[in-house]
Amino acid sequence: MSHGQSGGCACLPSSAENKTPLQENIGSLGARIGVLAILICGVVFLIGLLIKTKDPEYPDNPSWIYMILIAVTLAVAAIPEGIPLCVTISLAIGCQEMVAKNVQVRKIAAVETLGSASVICSDKTGTLTEGKMTMTKMWSGGLEYNVTGQGFDPTKGAVFRAGVVAAPGSNSNRELGVRSTLLAALLCCDTQLFLEEDPSTGERTWQYRGNSSEAPIVVAARKVGLPEDIVSQYRRILTIPFSSSRKMMLTVTEVAGRTHLCEGGMALPPMTRSFTVCKGAPNWIIQNCSSILRADGSIDPLSEAEKQQINTQVVDAYSDLALRVLAVAVGCIQQPPLDLESEDISVDQKFEALKSGLTLCGMVASMDPDREGVQESVLAARGAGIRVVMITGDYLKTAIAIARRVDILQDHDSLTDSAVDCNMLRPAGDDQYLCDEKIDDMTSRVRVFARAKPADKLEIVKSLQRQGLVCAMTGDGVNDAPALHEARIGVAMGLQGTEVAKGAAEMVLTDDNFTSIVKAVEKGRAIYAGIQKFVAFIMSVHIAEVIQIFFCVVVSMPLMRTPLQILFLILVTDLPPSIALGMEPGERNILEQPPRPKEEPIVLGWMWISICLNGLILSVVIIGVYVVSLQHYLGVVFLSDILEKKKGTPSEAEIHDIDMNLSKARTVAFISLVFCENVRAYICRSFSEPVWVDLCTNSVMQRAVLMAQVAMLCAVLIPFFSTDILGLDGLHIGWWGWLFSLVGPAATLVLCELSKLLTKWQMKRFSVVV
């Protein structure tokens, strides 16, 4: 259907498609309440006509006119006008508060969806770890080396042969394998090292610009004495960047006229014109090598047995230490197999021609420390019923070691069931995934996916969400965008993320930190719980209003308040506490509760019982206050008795006194109701805990109640506004009226607190964790 056919005005924008599930839920609730309100209004109107209810102020008017006024009053009381406004304000304030937790919410629906998150799929580098890699080990020519130093400072640290006691001041910086491996890797890097000055302190620190995996290589190369500008001495002919399918980066550099790669480096065969370097995943690099560089500079054939030995004794051993391993292989080209600088030849064709027949030069292994607080956040997520899944491009053993370190995997977990290589998702080839049932069986138990591609992320997300789980997925690259878009909660990285990834996500982490996701989930739960609290508060108030008016009509008492008074109560004295409830801090055990089912209604079964019970308590208390006030000021309670008094009163002054006394009784009930609703606002801060628990932790509530009290005092004390507009008279109710109005909130506090015992029982009955 076109926009013009949809029934809306073509000149105005439609916001229907922008509604969040919560807003749709609230809209549906409001529609049902509206229909119910119309039915109640109709019933009350008919009852009033049948018993011929009269207006006590204008007894000569026909009954149907007065009943129309009552029906309108009842409609105003029944329809919760403030809920949509409070929901919007609560979500908007929640988005603003999340900025302080390093989370930018791009789509407001994510705030409410966070409370339902049951799985968090997280990248490793930069999210679970700091993304500040430091090289600690390297291997070349069958020899293992240790690299000392911390961070990105190239002036501190050196390379030492492992297992050898070095003489003071000596190191392995000049060894052929070390210099050849590091320079080759440097020729396949696009990362730069520089000194940055802090403008506030003037302190200068070493930083890098480029890829976090390449930074340790640049730092280590400087540690062994390779000049800062050495890369500029080699003209790069070709660059094939790293991709998730190739698992390596490849460069070709011009070396014509050189006999050695560098001073103290490997010898180059005669007539070598170009030098190929491949840097990437060890298993992919090693399988494309046919020879190996030895420690003495010789090059020998590389057998399958030796490949297996290197994978087991070097790659697996480093991976078990949670080190990220990159292999470096080289190739010497006398005559290029094709025109490397031609744009008519595709990158894939060039890659296929250059990637094989390489010489394994060495390996570098870097440590990426865990982010502070990640382990605690993973445990908090587990306690909240949220499964944390790590998806990484790292080698499986590296991924397992890191997952154990941050408690994603625990000691009792079976590695065969909990950690897999993503090749198991597509055993028949890159584009041929297992059937949905098999993938679902795998994703239901696995918490670590290694050697993952962006396409694997998409399949994992689809599988988890087929199982009814609400998935939060992190990503930073362009290729991550489909998975971020597919996930119910796409989480992009703010520091390292691309604009494409940010555009596909619902929220952005400004610090790229996993702990911020858990904090956002906690805040999302608190926001949703706050919305539930003010919905319960507003609904109980409206139910009480309906009961009070219905009672007055049925027992033939003067109407307790006018439509304008009800609107004033709802929009002026009730709205500030409602908004304050939406900003209520999360309860202490909010992360000990299971995730909220995504289709769960905003008002649960046990909440309806609590709402109706509290509405009934409020009604009984205020009706009692009103009845006593009528008896005190008028000496009668029922409408017929008031009309009889007016008929037997000869003077206009006495009739006016009767109307003024009726206004006083309504004023006492009005004041008491405001007090009661303010007490109810405090009681609604928790469905199960006593009102005095964390009584003053929400400073917004104190200001909101103060505002409501000021508004109430203005309504009953300001001349003209009080008497002529609202029909109230607080100036003449006397000390008795002010003191008696306090009976209502005292009774409300006691009875509503007692009702929480029933609410607790109902919560347990409905299987809710208290």
Image (spheres, rainbow, N blue to C red):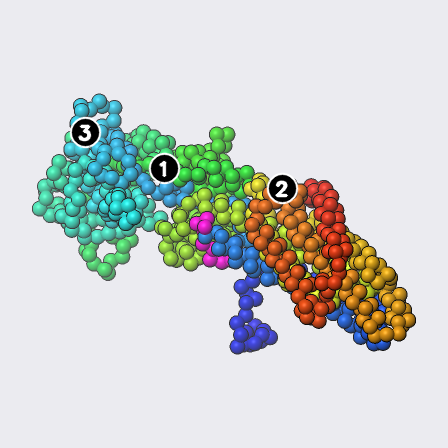
User: Looking at the image, do the residues carrying marks 1 and 3 touch, with CB atoms under 8 Å apart?
Assistant: no
In the rendered image, residue 451, in percent from the top left (x then y), is placed at 39, 42
Residue in view at x 87 percent, y 71 percent: 646
Q: Secondary structure at mark 2?
A: loop
**Mark linked to residue 322:** none
State the quadrant of the N terminus.
bottom right
Residue 462 visible in the picture: yes
Q: Residues within 10 Å of mark 1 (few under 14, many from 20)?
A: some
> Which segment is the magenta one?
100-108
Which quarter shows the C terminus?
top right
Residue lying at 88% horizontally and 68% vertically, measured from the top left: 645
As measured in the structure, the alpha-carbon distance from the residue carrying label 2 to the one carrying label 3 is 64 Å
Circle nearer the N terminus (2, 3) = 3
Tell me what residue is drawn at x 16 percent, y 46 percent.
229
| Residue identifier under label 3 | 171
Magenta stretch encompasses residue 106: yes
Q: Which residue is mark 1?
A: 369
Q: Position of residue 604 (x, y in %)?
A: 67, 51
Per the rendering, the mark at residue 693 is: 2
Residue 421, relative to residue 560: is it above or below? above
Query: What is the three-letter code of the residue carrying label 1?
Result: Pro
The prevailing secondary structure element of the residues shown in magenta is: loop
Q: Residues within 10 Å of mark 3 (few under 14, many from 20)?
A: some
Q: Nearer the viewer, residue 560 or 762?
A: 560
Decide if residue 337 is on the left or right side of residue 378.
left
Does the magenta run of residues contain 137? no
Along the viewing direction, whichever of 456 and 770 lies nearer the viewer: 770
Q: Secondary structure at mark 3?
A: loop
- Counting from the top left corner in percent of width and height, residue 705 is at 62, 54
Residue 393 in view here = no
